[in-house]
Amino acid sequence: MYGEDVMAGDWRRRKVIPEVEAETDLVVEDADSGFCGAVVGFELGAVVLEDRFGKRRNFPLTPAAFLLDGQVVTLIRPAPKQQPGRQRRVTASGSIAVDDVKARVAKASRIWVEGIHDAALVERIWGDDLRIEGIVVEPLDGIDDLAGAVREFGPSRTRRLGVLVDHLVAGSKESRIVAAVKDPNVLVTGHPYVDVWQAVKPERVGLRAWPVIPPGRPWKEGVCEAVGVRQPADMWRRILASVSSYKDVETPLINSMERLIDFVTVLDD
């Protein structure tokens, strides 16, 4: 149970930050390091910038992390472009769809998420991509014994494990649990939201912002009460129905899932 929005104290969230597509050759500056360069590509969910001396660095697509002409912006992946005279189908995640290819037999590597709502949202956006790669997403019943579950899974170079964690912020209970997982064949990523519900853009479900729930009140029940919905199950159906692509969820969730997918598939032929 958590109270105020975990990102409420971040100055970057106090005003609307414009989203800008990171088109090739767009020149931006990383707000933290001051590194300035042109966009030359993407790797592992990060944008690759090249400065005027030819030096390249990778930067996560973190909200409000870049400056464009002196203005704070959030960089996002460009929408796939269609070839002239040819229609290209894309998946909900923004990937180019591969037609006439059957889903692969499930591989040993896995992606774990915290619950069935997380699994359903991941399936809604990345399901097509994961079936092509043969990666199964499994919901956990909480992460309190994550280290023990990882040991039981037995990760290896050919049996990698990715874990998506809710509310993974500095100083949280989740951050302490994750710190105990040190296997090089395991990647744990997360998002700052109290629950995966909050990773869905509020305007998609008709809200200006997600309600701030006071300490001591279960978050989902508090949201339902604030918006006039009787049961969390009803609210969840409303949320899931509002999501049709990656554009309907917040950037931290997108970045985390792309890193996990890259991690568990990087050893493929």
Image (tube, rainbow, N blue to C red):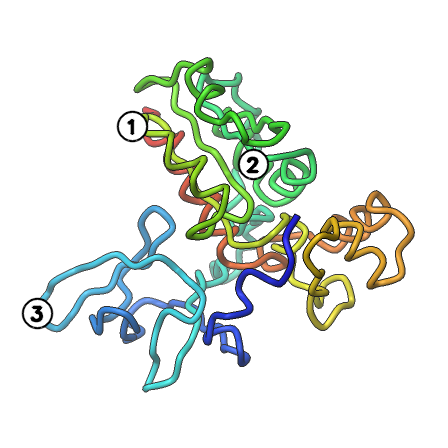
In the image, residue 69 sits, relative to residue 21, either above or below, namely: below
Secondary element under disc 1, as helix, strand or loop, is loop
Label pair 2/3, CB-CB below 8 angstroms:
no
Q: CA distance from mark 1 to mark 3?
A: 34 Å
- Of tags 1 and 3, the one toward the viewer is 1
Depth check: 209 or 88 in front?
209
At 50% from the left and 39% from the top, the residue drawn is 164
Q: Which residue is mark 3?
A: 53
Residue 191 location (% of width, % of height): 51, 50
Which of the labelled discs sits on residue 88, or is there none? none
Left or right of residue 227: residue 189: left
At 72% from the left and 65% from the top, the residue drawn is 211
- Label 3 amino acid? Phe
Q: Which residue is mark 1?
A: 184
Residue furthest to the front in view is 216
Depth check: 201 or 220 in front?
220
Q: Which residue is mark 2?
A: 99
Q: CA distance from mark 2 to mark 1?
A: 34 Å
- Of tags 2 and 3, the one toward the viewer is 3
Secondary element under disc 3, as helix, strand or loop, is loop
Residue 128 location (% of width, % of height): 58, 37
Label pair 1/3, CB-CB below 8 angstroms:
no
Residue 140 location (% of width, % of height): 60, 28
- Label 1 amino acid? Pro
Mark 2 vs 1, N-terminal side: 2
Within 10 Å of the Cα at label 2, are there few (<14), some (14-19), or many (20+) other Cα atoms?
few
- Label 2 amino acid? Asp
- Residue 266: image quadrant is top left
